[in-house]
Image (spheres, rainbow, N blue to C red):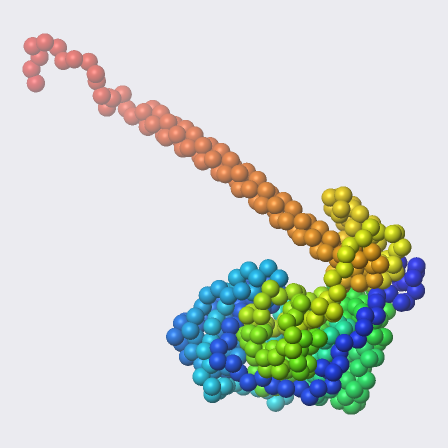
Amino acid sequence: MGLMEKLFGRDWGIHPDDHKRPAADAVTRTMPVPERLFVSLSQHLGAPARPVVLVGQKVRKGERLADPQGAVSAAIHAPTSGTITAIGEIPAPHPSGLPVLAITLEADGLDAWADLEGLNDPFLLPPAEISKKVAEAGVVGLGGATFPAALKLSLSEKAKVTTLVMNGGECEPYLSCDDRLMRDSAAAIVDGIGLMLHATGATQALVGIEDNKPEAIAAMQQAAAAQPHIRICPVPARYPMGSEKQLVQELTGHEIPADGRPGDVGVVVHNVGTAWAVHQAIRFGRPLVARLITVNGGCVAQPGNIMVPLGTLVEEVLAFAGGLNSAPARLVMGGPMMGMSLPQARVPVVKGSSGILALSAAEVAERTEEPCIRCATCVGACPMGLLPLDMARHIQANDLKGAVKTGLKDCIACGCCAYVCPAHIPLVQYFSHAKGELSAQEREKLRQESTRKLAQSRAQRLEREAREKAEAAARRKAERAAQAAATPESQAPSNLPAPQGATA
């Protein structure tokens, strides 16, 4: 049991107002392919993918556009058929708006698939082959972290993981894409879970779904009825239940160590949307080229969940959802608690885009910061059992080491502390700023260490070269001396002048 439970019982986290409906109950729609798609090469955790197509090249839907680079990366595929018109920088779907490399694809209107090959009985394949095919399909975690799914599957098989935890919590108050996916495609998700069990070697799967999704729970229970190794587990609706550390502890009773991973307690965590993508990849050979996105917020005319081709601009998704009934005070990609504010709507949808929120001024409700009253409300809300007020105090004093000692690196940036703070202190912004400073310091430390090693290596190289030159000179001198000593005296050249009058 963690510190938070010892001090405050089980009611950690917060209960934000539920804004999932009417979007959650609206019939899922599929968006037509737009005229032009902007496919980012950085849609996953790790190194950007490397383009393997050329400008002017024609491609079909599902054809590979970019290969993964490095140990942590993912392949990128064409969301439709058409022609590559550009490979260059576009604004990233990020608060900074900084440029990111992307492939521009002009659709031909045919939406013609490439030749794909699925598997009728993938359970006959070795686990490593399942992971390989998931990697070829470019599947990443669709819960938001976008970690390459194949890498997690293969590492879990090597680590002898025993339990697969499927995250269907979806605790963000405006999002319902996982809810709709479980309602509409429960059988496909359950099949994907079975494939992931085979790939990881785990013996059981626990599917955690918050109890405010009764329709999804019923659909998943029906789909998994004949699968005794797959258990559907309703969990309390509490933010951030969707965080892997909280969900693992709720379902298994195991607490993931600080600085640890779920694998340390024999668990691997995947999102239910990832299971759906695995099903598509293995059964039909379809790579990840589209995803279900929640379009919601007070400014959206027709909230709902839409299947969107990757690379579609946010402004086009909003237009398909009926447009906006007023100018949004804030545009967010993801959920309101942990999502990213967008500087503009001309940015593309990526694999990690779980939602597009157009929030009104009333929903944003900007508040004036006031002095801390030491009420400790933030302490009771923190799901990690941390002391946010103490961490903020250290950060305000520029004492990052003190903030780390009080748990900064364990903070999951869920925003619970800021949400409940009666003084409206933006605590999570302090923590994010401090983490950025720590990362910058660590990068600078690595740079200095690298410079030191390079200088040391250069000094050693120069010393070695000088020593080798001296040794070579000594060898040449010794060789000349030895040669001189070995020459017979009769053959020694005479430097004396010839006698006068001597004849030859």
Q: Position of residue 394 (x, y in %)?
A: 78, 46
Q: Position of residue 84 (x, y in %)?
A: 43, 75
User: Can residue 228 be spotted in the picture?
Assistant: no
Q: Position of residue 237 (x, y in %)?
A: 83, 75
Residue drawn at x 39%, y 30% is 473
Q: Residue lying farthest front?
A: 326
The image quadrant of residue 280 is bottom right
Residue drawn at x 40%, y 72% is 55
Residue drawn at x 45%, y 70% is 52
Depth check, front residue: 461 or 32: 32
Give the left or right position of residue 74, taking residue 20 as reference.
left
Image quarter hosting the C terminus:
top left
Give the left or right position of residue 95, taking residue 459 as reference.
right
User: Can residue 89 be spotted in the picture?
Assistant: yes
Depth check, front residue: 81 or 294: 294
Residue drawn at x 77%, y 48% is 403
Depth check, front residue: 489 or 53: 53
Q: Residue lying farthest top?
A: 500
Is 425 drawn above or below residue 174 in the view shown? above
Query: How many marks on residues?
Result: 0
Is 375 drawn above or below residue 157 in the view shown? above
The image quadrant of residue 1 is bottom right
Is 453 drawn above or below residue 488 in the view shown? below
Is 221 drawn above or below residue 311 in the view shown? below
Q: Position of residue 36 (x, y in %)?
A: 48, 77
